[in-house]
Amino acid sequence: MALTQRLRHSLVSRARAVPLARHAWARYRRHRYERRIERFVREKSGRADRLPMGAVYEATMRCNLECEFCYVGDLLNLEGEWRQEMTLDALRKAFPERDDLQISLTGGEIFMRKDIMSVLDLFREKGYACGYLTTNGTIINDERANALADLAAAGFLKHISISIDGPGELHDSARGVKGTFERTCAGLRRLQAAAKARNAPLRVSINTTVAHESLESLDQMVDVAEELGVDAIGLNHLMYSTPEEVAETVRLIGASDPSVIATFVTQDPGLNVARVREKVSALQEKCKRKNVLFDYRPKVHPQLIENYYTPGAKLEGRCLYPFLHARVSFSGKVYFCPFIRVEVGDLSTQTLEEIWNGDKLVDMRKRLVENGIFPVCRRCCKVELSPVPVAEPFGAGVAVPARRAIPLTVVQ
């Protein structure tokens, strides 16, 4: 089994280096995705399949860094809250016995949780596949690196995404703790060495964010990738909403408290649109020259950048994420999505199957498809934006034309 996994990984890695193969694979995934979500879009009932295809588990909300642009920053390190993390026994009971479910882990910083390797082993024993882990990389020691490489060699762990926002002091400044860059690089190298020693098919990529602190150094991320021997860079466009977008979303979902919206709320993201366009393009071109794989989310195509970074400007699109993926918190509470933290169930008292097509989640999904996307969804990493810019700014009092079919870019 492990040998088969390694052979397949070798073939996939070689194919990733060939543009035609990458494009063919992207078209295949797009076709498969559209077929999967066709019923949800057509019926607009809010009901999904019996169980999700995957779940994102927020293993902990503790973190050892203080990043200014973190969209869950207000949820981190709440006094006493982290003590509600689900025990291994509770996790074993809460998650279904289903060998084709994809689990991904995020936080917080997942390695702040001392039993995190036991959590991963539990999911492996259930027959799940781990699509990705996100980490800042600062507390990956040799023992953890070896254990993660073993999980990759067993075919369970596919991808680790490590957050880096620029070289040296720039990264430290963005992350709020001096020496972070060196510790992150050391953790990444430990992972690479452990995976190489086991010939394990583990992808390690670096992830960066468009922010005021990092904008001018975006293209230097390619130099960082080369120095670290990493062949893939993921770019997150800054995720934010205006107070007006939050208020309108709260009204549309029928919530009583705007605190259910967990994103960076601002009247001005503090970024020059022309400069963002220039620096993102420079990063993409440099990746192409250096043969470094490049992807970004959400899919803010060049023609959308002005609307994306202009507060209040409208963006059209759709989101089917809540039809396919469950969002499970460290305590077992299940939320509608990463940004809209409306509680739709609790795995400490319900099964995932009961929650997945329960009244609360079905009602929220129905509201979502009826509106296309909620206002706060416009700048979320899960949204599928229409590549066609919208001329009218949101809230300007301009009559909105009837909805029409629009081409969309799928974000997995």
Image (cartoon, rainbow, N blue to C red):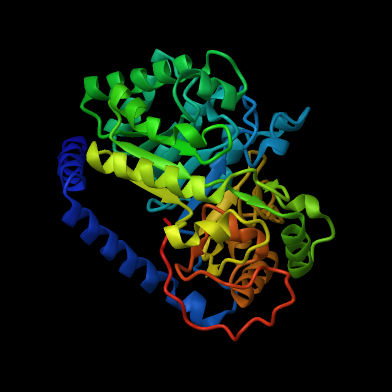
Point out the image quarter for the C terminus: bottom left
Residue sitting at 75 percent across and 52 percent down?
260
Say if residue 183 shows up in the picture: yes
- Please give left or right for residue 342 compared with residue 370 in the image: right
Residue sitting at 69 percent across and 48 percent down?
268
Residue sitting at 66 percent across and 72 percent down?
367
Task: Examine the rendered structure and indicate whether residue 293 appears above or below residue 53.
Answer: above
Say if residue 301 shows up in the picture: no
Task: Examine the rendered structure and indicate whether residue 219 appears above or below residue 315.
Answer: above
Residue that protrudes farthest toward the front in the picture: 274
Viewer-closest of 309 and 113: 309
Residue that protrudes farthest toward the right in the picture: 256
Q: Quadrant of residue 200?
A: top left
Q: Quadrant of residue 71?
A: top right
Task: Examine the rendered structure and indicate whether residue 284 appears above or below residue 378.
Answer: above
Residue sitting at 49 percent across and 61 percent down?
304
Q: Position of residue 281 (x, y in %)?
A: 38, 47
Q: Position of residue 152 (x, y in %)?
A: 31, 33
Total numbered labels placed on residues in the image: 0
Task: Examine the rendered structure and indicate whether residue 180 appears above or below residue 323.
Answer: above
Viewer-closest of 81 and 229: 229
Viewer-closest of 265 and 22: 265
Q: Position of residue 240 (x, y in %)?
A: 64, 50
- Please give left or right for residue 18 compared with residue 107 in the image: left
Residue that protrudes farthest toward the bottom in the picture: 402
Q: Position of residue 178 (x, y in %)?
A: 57, 14
Q: Quadrant of residue 279?
A: top left
Point out the image quarter for the N terminus: top left
- Please give left or right for residue 245 compared with residue 275 in the image: right
